[in-house]
Image (cartoon, rainbow, N blue to C red):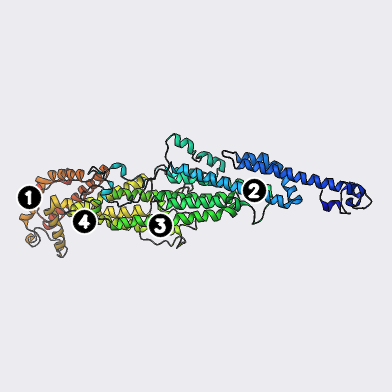
Amino acid sequence: LTDRDIEDAACPDPGFTASAGVPPAWTVAGKEMEEHLAKLRLRAISRTRTYFLDIMKELRRPKTHIRMIQTHALLKYGYLVDFLLVASPTIHGEIRDVYVESMSKTLHTLFRTYHKQLLTLDLRLATRVDLIAVEEAALRDAFSTKVNMRKRGDAFVLGDRAKVLDGAISAESGLDAAAAVVLIPPINAHVASMNGEKYPYEMIFRSIMSHLIDAATNEYVFARQFFKEYGQNDCFHAIFGKTLSLVLEQLENYLFNCHDAIAILLMIKLTHSYKRTVKARRIDKVLEPFLDRVTNLLWPRLKMVMDAHLRSIRSANAKKCGGGDIHPHLISRRYAEFTCSILLILNRGRKAGSSMDVGNDKLPADKIMPRSSSHGSSATSAPSHRGSAGDMLMNDLDVMLEEMNLLLKRLADEHSSNKKRVVFMINNLDQIITIFKERRVAGKELNRFSEILVHQRELFVEEELLQTFSKMIAFVQQTEAHMSGISVPRGARGVAAPADVVNPEVVESLVREFASNWKSGIEQINRNVLSYFSNFRNGMEILKQVLTQLLLYYTRFQDVIRKVWRGKPPSFCKDLVSTSVIL
């Protein structure tokens, strides 16, 4: 009972209305009990205050089960908080301030310690020199001239790192939040340290953010239930302000020396999923600004790392990177692995049955502009979100594609012969395409490199045939060009001045030379192809293409002879090799 009820003549309590309308405090009994009630109230306030302060001391003790205390020692006696709010607002404010201070310090200490423990488990995969076009000296051991294969590019291969998104993707696909957590639990720092385990930083980030969002959800709900605060000035920000600032500071400090684009992009994807999580839990009002600040830290750093990779490709040359070999270069492998990793991360979480065109994938609609799957076509089929961070990332990939093509040409120009330059281009293009297909990544990049590879193969076919059958090819090309300007009368028979078109002696020597050398020529082509191309499947495709083109040239050579000698074939025609024999 309050003082107001005791002195109110209209008090609805049946015991008071029986006093003939006289306020309870005016009666003799009321006056006698008023002093006792005041003492009881003060004693109840004192004992309630002592109880809550003792419980809140427990919150500051290490290894305390906070949720258990909140449920069984605080929420269970929530009506006492309502009593304090009416009986003594000052004590109520004191209890609130003590709880806020206690939980703020406890959470700040817990997350600071947890992050410090997790940093000892950090598997730093990329350093400042881990760029796509890295200098060859950076890959050598201190006391060796050979390239250390362990430095080939773990920072560029996605591998199993995308599993960090499995929990978030599963939740988006229809599983509840609990099922997602079971798929990938946060890191237990003590167990991982005892087992000597190491994790990439995106796993550390996911563990911290998962605990942070769970703790924030718990505190948000508890504070509303316990203190009955539902306005803008509730105690959530006072409790979590220092902790959120700490997490942002820790992330910013790590990003300052982070050169792992894959880790940063995975963290961006995780942050997007956490935004959907807090919205589903209806705590987006208090946590979405924090997640926006996390995103604003990650995107600029990703842009800086992408720019560093682009600069390395632009400034690379044969002297720095080593381009004297015709076999696939390490740079092409790094580029292919890096691009595939980026596109696979962007594609993560797409609905089943969607196209395999990873290159056309997009982040949430406000972040990524849809891409065209063919080179050079405009993106008029989908709306553009120009200026967004995702659009910027896709533009960087487009620029990187063209810069990589120019770099391969610069490295190829270091070779002495045109044939070696073509072989170098084919080997590197084939390696890039092979990695794209192994990773099941299709789209603009794959189409572009496939077009270039087709052109380079055509150039190699001509170069290889000119090395062995140059006389016959030159004769066919020159004679066909000459004959295209001569009109032969219809019905003409016999040798119509063949000397005006070809030299019969030259033709005879070409026929006999081909008949005697075609087998050895094909064997030489086969040996060259096997030695030039490290990918056996690519070599067989090129060998088929060379032999097909050789057969076409020889067929055209025979057609020239038939057109020149329309009537009686010359005697050396018996030495012509049948195409069925060649096949």
Q: Nearer the viewer, residue 332 or 274?
A: 274
SS assignment at label 1: helix
In the image, 305: left or right of 83?
Answer: left
**Residue closest to the eye, 539 or 230:** 230
Tag 3 residue: 303
- Quick check: can you spot residue 340? yes
In the rendered structure, which amino acid carries the disc numbered 1? Phe
Density class for disc 4 (Cα within 10 Å; few <14, some 14-19, many ≥20) is some
**Earlier residue among tags 3 and 2:** 2
Task: Please identify, in this view, whether the residue under mark 3 or under mark 4 is nearer the observer.
Answer: 3
From the top left corner, tell me how far across and down residue 68 is, in percent. Answer: 63, 39
What type is the residue that disc 4 sits on? Asp
Q: Which numbered disc, 3 or 2, marks the residue closer to the eye?
A: 2
Residue 470 location in percent, x, y?
13, 53
N-terminal of the pair, mark 1 or mark 2, is 2
Q: Which residue is mark 1?
A: 572
Image spot of residue 412 (x, y percent): 22, 54
Q: Is residue 223 left or right of residue 373?
A: right
Return the mark for residue 413: 4
Q: Are marks 3 and 4 in contact (CB under 8 Å)?
A: no
| Residue nearest the viewer, comparing 263 with 20 | 20
Q: Hey, which quadrant is residue 302 in on the image?
A: bottom left
The mark lying in front, picked from 2 and 4, is 2
User: Comparing marks 1 and 3, which lies closer to the viewer?
Assistant: 3
User: What residue is shown with label 2?
Assistant: 98
